[in-house]
Image (cartoon, grey):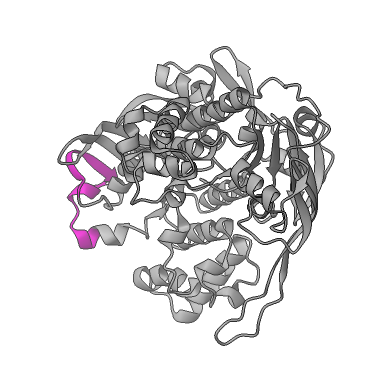
Amino acid sequence: MTGDANANANAPLLSVQGLTLASRHASVVDALSFDVHPGEVLGIVGESGSGKTMAARAVIGLLPQAIRRTAGRIVFEGQDLAALAPAALRRVRGRRIGMVFQEPMTSLNPALTIGRQLDEGLAQQTTLGRDERRERIVAMLARIGLPDGGARLTAYPHEFSGGMRQRIMIASAMLMQPALLIADEPTTALDAVIQREVAQLMLGLTREQGAAAIVISHDLAMVAEFAQRVVVMEAGRIVETGSSEAILLQPRHPYTRRLLDALPRRAPARAVARTPVPVLEVRDLAVDFPGRRGLFRRKSAPKQAVRGVSLQVMAGETVALVGASGSGKTTVGRAIVGLQAASRGEVLFQGRPIGIRDAAAHQAWRQGCQMVFQDPYGSLDPRMRVAELVAEALRALRRPEAAERVRQTLAEVGLDPAFGERFPHELSGGQRQRVAIARAIVRKPAFVVADEPVSALDMTVQKQILSLIRALQDKHGFACLFVSHDLGAVEQVADRVLVMDEGQIVEDGARDQVFDHARHPVTRRLLGAMPALQPEGEGFRLLRRQFAPA
């Protein structure tokens, strides 16, 4: 009897055995096997398309219609989930297995208040009364950092920041007190501080409730910091598994070593000549957003998004503008290129104000200043082919000359000229970002604003795009304002760093000076949220974070 009890105590909470998923045309997951024990945090890492998300969705029976399970068992708490009837699986999903999806804005219903959405699972899966459910919801909202949760139950998802929406998704899953939480890219596209806060909150809640967790991500450093074990997936297969420390320090598979090689490393400092006239100068820029009037509410107070920002960017220099979400950094970039009206201040391009009254200066600025947007899929017209998109800025050239320039530029960004006949939806995320860069540099501009150009890309693709930007800048000599919350990316490309907080620049200095000797508390907090990795042999050792609180 004692032996049976010990066996049950050591039995995995979840056991995936030989799981194989396929579409009509290809295998998606091939003979996948792994276990998760009670209280354990398991990390699953890999690039986009590695099959990690499909494997997680198979566990809770939420596969797309085009994907089917062709082999394997999924045993949870002693029962095979793959053999359960839909009604029985619904009783497990949510109540015993919770899931936090990658994009909360698409997972939360925009037409329903958060109170109603948080109450839905409790109402369906528990016997709690309405008052008891409300009490539990308010307590959970306080736990995730929303102390006035009772008053915010009538708010809609769009009224919250991205980080808070992700916290609400975590609250929704943990309200049911599941035995297993599956988190699919829970911190993608969040700034470093919020990433760490969200990860700590999610895993803190699982520990409090005695639950296990599966964390899915392309960020190996983040996963290794919080998970006890890591599974590395490539093309639907497990290529390596082991403890987090062993995976970081002694990677065995070439694919794992490639993921580690993509982790941020500081590039050598460059000497940038200080010319008498900067390519771009911003003087005392301010941007105010007017208040909004609701259907049944008074007009809200105006918001000052940018307050007295001044900066200079020299020829060939990359100046990084960093800060947490809502700091005003993107608004500054959009105001510089004319996509956001400034309330006051002045922008000078090559020493001349860009006011419309000076038609020549305005035209030079329009042609010599370009922007690479955060989301290339949203900024590229889906009805146009790649060659047409890149050629938009070349309307003044004759067609043969423009076509040749497009071919040269596509080759410069690492794309075969044959890609010119494709539409954006036929490209990967990294390829679309290369097209966006090609469109920005095809006129050989003097100044480029890169707004979060790698925030939603895999680490390996991030490294490729950052190396491409650096190489193109060395070749063409354009100045660059690199807007980002990702200090790992900034460390690889920036010559100078400006740190923003609440619409103002709070720290300004050379990259190495800011990273190694940060003065302002905001800068130190941003740096303290970065994983501290020390190269060692073929891998890395995870150190205590720089500037992290004691």
Indicate the quadrant where residue 8 lies: top left
Image position, residue 446 (x, y; %): 65, 36
Q: How many marks?
A: 0
- Residue beneath the point at 78% across and 25% down: 273
Q: Say if residue 269 shows up in the picture.
A: yes
The residue positioned farthest toward the front in the image shown: 398
Q: Is residue 545 left or right of residue 43?
A: right
Q: Quick check: can you spot residue 77?
A: no
Say whether residue 76 is left or right of residue 458.
left
Is 57 a magenta residue? no
* 71 magenta-colored: yes
Apparent side of residue 254 relative to residue 474 in the rendered image (left or right):
left
State the residue at coordinates (37%, 60%).
Answer: 95
Which picture quadrant has residue 530? top right
Q: Is residue 385 above or below residue 489?
A: below
Residue 483 on image: x %, y %: 64, 43
Front residue of 220/481: it is: 481
Place of residue 107 in the rendered image (x, y in percent of width and height, measured from the top left):
41, 60
Counting from the top left corner in percent of width and height, residue 126 is at 38, 70
Nearest the viewer among 210 and 48 is 48
Quarter of the image containing the C terminus? top right
Q: Foreground residue, 133 or 106? A: 106
Q: Magenta part of the protein: which range?
A: 66-88
Image position of 266 (left or right of 240) = right
Relative to 540, is 489 above or below?
Answer: below
Residue sitting farthest toward the bottom: 296
In the image, residue 346 above or below residue 540: below
The quadrant of the rendering that contains the N terminus is: top left
